[in-house]
Amino acid sequence: MVKKVFSILWFLLIGVIVFLFVKSVTGPNEAKIDGAFNYVLDVMYSDGLHNSNSDMIYWRGRFYLIHANSPFHLGSTHCKLILWQSDDGIKWEKMKEFNSPGEDIRDPKFAEINGQLFLYVLVNRDFFAEPYRTLFARSRDGRNWTPFEPLRGDAEGWLFWRPKTRDCIEWYVTGYWNEHGKSALFHSRDGIYWELVSIIYEGDRNDETDFEFFPDGTIICIARLEVSDSWFGHPDGCTLIATAKPPYKEWSKVKSTITRLDGPCLFTFEGKVFATGRRDCSNEGPFWYMGSIFNKKRTSLWHVTPEELVWLTDFPSAGDTVYGGVAMRGGNIYFCYYSSPITKDYPWVVGMLGKTDILMLKCSKDDFREFVSLKIGKE
């Protein structure tokens, strides 16, 4: 009897996926791109595989971009990271491929620490992509890299996001616990040995956590709160916003229910904090709650304040998308991210199984400033 019920449920699930696929390939992409947002979009890399989890840095006069390359979104021992270098953000030279033998590797993050380029990655042994530790490698020239090795100090079991500094001496990073449920702030002076500063939040299946500094040294961080690991998401799925002043021991917290901001990337522009991250297009049951694999997803731009997330615009995106990086050079801001084909409007579950490309969106600082002033006003 149990097997029969399971077979029926599995048949219904496959039927829903097929229905959503047919519906998505016959309709236009409905991303909400504000007409006042001026940008140039290019496909940085496409090879028919699932290219995802990107990050980017401008270091020593060159762009460095890295992304995962895999058969699909889920865990795979065939997954590798591809590192690229560019002088102009347009023409890219392939530098190196990284892997972790016998494991899946994902979520690469750059940081320049003590004159070296650090690369932090998460490794995973689970088909459903549940990383269990953070590794790092480093380079003095961007071409030759040390082997991956585990972090030291209090870092074991924590999944690091993107290290940042205000003075190039004291480094901080946010991380979430490998079994989910809590996020924390860490401190280092060398990028290798990390000390726990404080627990930011516990509960609600706390996941990916990123942060940024305000000009006065206050840290603001956002965290993905899944609440449930159900494939259908959860109506209470949301984004944590937490702030703390030095020495970063006490955190003020609010929740934003506008989206569950998966794959967050926070950055500052003229004293304000912004983010790219995933926007859920629905929070309606029983199959389309926040975080559902059946939802349509977008890469979106957000203004982040201690009180709320403010949605500004979507980027061209669909299906499986986001996990990007931001770099600034001269008068331009460069955003990298990944997406399923933007000519269609696949639900997330379909995008996870198919082709995705690495995209590069460029916006002039003048246009960005004008757009932000239009959306949130001048302060």
Image: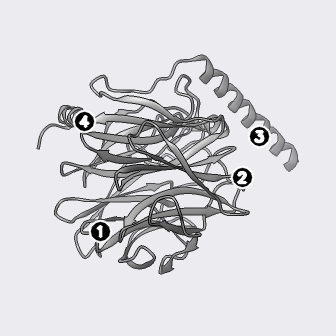
Disc 1 marks which residue?
251
Q: Quadrant of the C terminus?
A: top left
x, y percent for residue 121: 54, 62
Q: CA distance from mark 4 to mark 1?
A: 31 Å
CB-based contact (under 8 Å), mark 4 and mark 1? no
Q: Residues within 10 Å of mark 4 (few under 14, many from 20)?
A: some
- Residue at the location (64% across, 27% down)? 20
Q: Dot 3 lies on which element?
A: helix
CB-based contact (under 8 Å), mark 3 and mark 4? no
- Say which label, 3 or 4, has the lower sequence index: 3
- Say which label, 2 or 3, has the lower sequence index: 3
Q: CA distance from mark 2 to mark 4?
A: 39 Å
Q: Nearer the viewer, mark 2 or mark 3?
A: 2
Disc 4 marks which residue?
368
Please state which amino acid type lies under the numbered disc 3.
Leu
Near-viewer residue (26 or 60): 60
Image disc number at residue 78: 2
Please state which amino acid type lies under the numbered disc 2.
His
- Say which label, 2 or 1, has the lower sequence index: 2
Image disc number at residue 9: 3
